């Protein structure tokens, strides 16, 4: 059978494409996923189904790709958790549903992506959400598949209330709706979690489409490479249950994420020719931008002894702080996540953890293959904090967090001694830089490894509708397509990208 559309990757973007495109009953669509499929919400394991009040901050090995990356010259063993199941990383993430801000899309348009202004993407942000708090107001939606809510302050944990009080008294403005354009400061995070259930694209978009006879889902199938004939993608080679098969389609869409998509492209002979030749891959199409421009939100982890036992298993990410670093030209370029829980992240001590994070780094990294096999994960070199501007802003955020936690009266009785922190290095810029490089960590927001742009941009991989340059019948629709990261957790933006390109594909653009 030759499908009309073949989608590789059943994650945040892939499930949306599958759902929207099969609204046309004449379109036969095949959705491929390397991980397992749970056909109903009730069938999901608790760590996948439940997002808050569970140990879902830790991905089970059976649902994780097991990637590792190089954070910096002083840290080369950083885990990069990514979801490997139907739902992808939307099924295992922290569910913070922040949108990109208008300034992000102004930057995208300045790079030549004139179809991605904030005014043009806003309708798709609204289309995908059912905001239980602000759905009836401007800039929001109330009819979309993804439920969004915010914890009211009376439900916050003691650590969250203390954090908010300290931030307010430090002069940060109140932010009741962080998804409203121009918002900044301290307030509740929008969360795609309703009644404790994580609103992944598997339990929302895909669940609504599963019974359509024109939608075909194949799980536990690893895509090894694209099938290419005369400059056109005609399908994929997959491995299912130890057997290799060929699947064909009129159009193939890579939704395998910022790591999987460039890996599949390069294994298929599409990418920077010198690198492909180094690993013994025949070059089909020289496309130098594939795997370049690796973006993330670099962070470090600070923690203090917790002096109370949380009522729930986790109090995390209920209230957040966004701000602009001193003398920065990038608005809302910093974000801080705070949480508390017993033995969080595998430790044995109840503690308060704080993650000051660059919400928009200027540095970038690179993804490259190790071998010519899909079974060998690629090399991920993030190069965090190599840029002086990034180090300056991160130092300021670390010092701010330390001051608020250790000196504000609101935290008396909340936390005690430092468990993880820079210690005496806090007072010396060079020493603090070394500590940051040795403790750099992922913000879990890898993106931009196959960026869209104009044909005149030698590093652009695809056009503004995701069509890959130089290869017919092939698109990219996932986080790798972003020309730069957004100043937000990226899940909502990946969903928006999928909604927008699905509409364009359905309309024949």
Image (cartoon, rainbow, N blue to C red):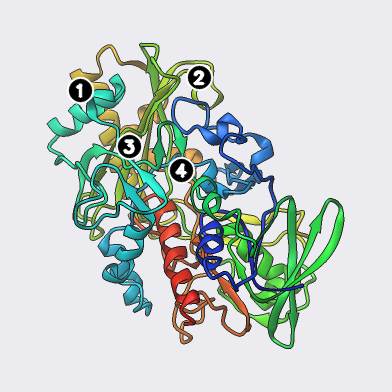
Gap in Å between the C-alphas at discs 1 and 4?
A: 36 Å
Mark earlier in primary sequence (3, 2): 2
Which mark identifies residue 199?
4
Residue ID for mark 1: 408
159 versus 335 height, above or below: above
Q: Is residue 325 left or right of residue 460?
A: left
Mark earlier in primary sequence (3, 1): 3
Which mark identifies residue 343?
2
Which of discs 1 and 4 lies nearer the camera? The answer is 4
* Contact? badges 2 and 4 (CB < 8 Å): no
Gap in Å between the C-alphas at discs 1 and 2?
A: 24 Å
Position in image of residue 1 (x %, y %): 77, 72
Say few, some or many: other residues with alpha carbon within 10 Å of mark 3 (under 14 / 14 to 19 / 20 or more). Answer: many
Say few, some or many: other residues with alpha carbon within 10 Å of mark 4 (under 14 / 14 to 19 / 20 or more). Answer: many
* Contact? badges 1 and 2 (CB < 8 Å): no
Gap in Å between the C-alphas at discs 3 and 4?
A: 32 Å
Gap in Å between the C-alphas at discs 3 and 1?
A: 15 Å
Which of discs 3 and 2 lies nearer the camera? The answer is 2
Report whether residue 461 is seen: yes
Compare residues 11 and 44 and report the one nearer the observer: 44
Compare residues 148 and 375 and report the one nearer the observer: 148
């Amino acid at each position: 059978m030759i499908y009309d559309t073949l989608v590789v990757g059943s994650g945040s973007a892939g499930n949306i494409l599958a759902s929207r495109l099969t609204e046309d009953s004449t379109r036969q669509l095949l959705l491929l996923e390397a991980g397992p499929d749970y056909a109903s919400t009730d069938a999901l394991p608790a760590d996948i189904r439940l997002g808050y009040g569970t140990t879902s901050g830790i991905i089970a090995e059976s649902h994780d790709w097991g990637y590792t990356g190089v954070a910096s010259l002083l840290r080369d063993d950083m885990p990069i958790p990514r979801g490997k199941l139907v739902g992808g990383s939307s099924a295992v993430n922290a569910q913070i549903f922040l949108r990109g801000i208008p300034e992000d899309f102004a930057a995208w348009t300045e790079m030549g992506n004139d179809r991605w202004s904030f005014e043009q993407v806003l309708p798709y942000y609204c289309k995908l959400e059912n905001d239980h708090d602000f759905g009836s107001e401007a800039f929001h939606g109330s009819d979309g598949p993804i439920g969004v809510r915010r914890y009211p302050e009376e439900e916050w944990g003691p650590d969250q209330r203390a954090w908010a009080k300290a931030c307010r008294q430090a002069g940060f403005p109140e932010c009741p709706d962080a998804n409203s354009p121009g918002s900044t400061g301290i307030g509740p995070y929008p969360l795609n979690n309703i009644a404790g259930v994580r609103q992944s694209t598997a339990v929302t978009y895909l669940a609504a489409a599963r019974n359509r006879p024109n939608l075909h889902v194949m799980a536990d199938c690893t895509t090894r490479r694209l099938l290419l004939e005369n400059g056109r993608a005609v399908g994929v080679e997959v491995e299912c249950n130890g057997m290799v098969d060929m699947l064909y389609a009129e159009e193939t869409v890579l939704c395998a994420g910022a790591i999987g998509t460039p890996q599949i492209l390069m294994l298929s002979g599409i990418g920077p020719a010198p690198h492909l030749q180094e690993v013994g891959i025949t070059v089909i199409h020289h496309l130098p931008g594939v795997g370049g421009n690796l973006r993330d939100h670099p962070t470090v982890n600070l923690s203090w002894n917790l002096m109370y036992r949380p009522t729930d298993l986790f109090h995390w990410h209920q209230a957040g702080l966004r701000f602009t670093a001193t003398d920065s030209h990038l608005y809302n370029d910093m974000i801080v996540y705070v949480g508390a829980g017993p033995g969080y992240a595998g430790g044995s001590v109840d503690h308060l953890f704080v993650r000051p994070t660059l919400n928009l780094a200027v540095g970038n990294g690179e993804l490259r293959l190790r071998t010519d096999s899909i079974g060998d994960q690629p090399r991920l070199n993030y190069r965090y904090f190599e840029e002086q501007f990034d180090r300056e802003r991160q130092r300021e955020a670390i010092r701010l967090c330390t001051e608020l936690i250790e000196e504000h009266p609101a935290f008396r009785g909340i936390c005690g001694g430092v468990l993880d922190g820079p210690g005496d290095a806090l007072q010396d810029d060079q020493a603090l830089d070394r500590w940051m490089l040795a403790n750099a960590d992922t913000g879990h927001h890898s993106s931009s490894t196959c960026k869209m742009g104009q044909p005149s941009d030698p590093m652009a991989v695809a056009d503004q509708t995701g069509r890959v340059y130089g290869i017919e019948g092939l698109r990219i629709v996932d986080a790798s397509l972003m020309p730069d990261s957004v100043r937000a957790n990226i899940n909502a933006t990946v969903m928006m990208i999928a909604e927008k390109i699905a509409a364009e594909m359905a309309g024949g653009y």
